[in-house]
Amino acid sequence: MSDKNQKNPKTHDDLKGFDIKINEFGEIISSYSVDKLNGFLNENVEDKKLKDREDLDLNEK
């Protein structure tokens, strides 16, 4: 598929402009920092490993 036939996927408003690629050396190149991505994921994605733990209050901020 050529680049001009590819459509951008729907994204969350907080991730507008996010782009990620893997270069010829296998390095991940991203338009966002890892800290910014982790912050977004922490706010918007439930951690399945932690959801049933009674000793944590995940609603605390």
Image: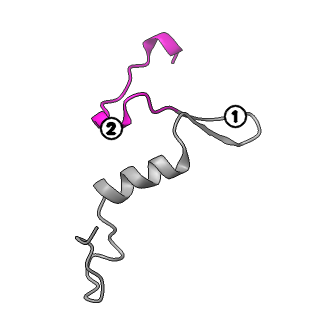
Image position, residue 6 (x, y; %):
43, 18
Q: Name which residue type carries label 1.
A: Asn
Farthest residue to the left: give it. Answer: 59
Residue drawn where x is 35% and y is 29% of the image = 9
> Residue 26, relative to residue 45: is it above or below?
above
Image position, residue 49 (x, y; %):
36, 75
The residue singled out by tag 2 in the image is 14
The Cα atoms of the two marked residues, 1 and 2, are separated by: 25 Å
Instruction: Look at discs 1 and 2 and give the one toward the viewer.
Output: 2
Residue drawn where x is 54% and y is 49% of the image = 34
Is the image coloured rainbow, by chain, by secondary structure, or in one colour?
one colour
Residue 23 is marked as 1
Residue drawn where x is 27% and y is 73% of the image = 58
Which segment did they paint magenta?
1-19
Q: Name which residue type carries label 2.
A: Asp
Secondary structure mostly taken by the magenta-highlighted segment of the chain: loop
Number of marks drawn: 2
Q: Is residue 3 magenta?
A: yes
Mark earlier in primary sequence (1, 2) = 2
Image position, residue 52 (x, y; %):
26, 81
Farthest residue to the top: give it. Answer: 4
60 or 32, which is in the foreground? Answer: 60
Q: Residues within 10 Å of mark 1 (few under 14, many from 20)?
A: few
> Residue 48, relative to residue 44: is it above or below?
below
Q: Are marks 1 and 2 in contact (CB under 8 Å)?
A: no
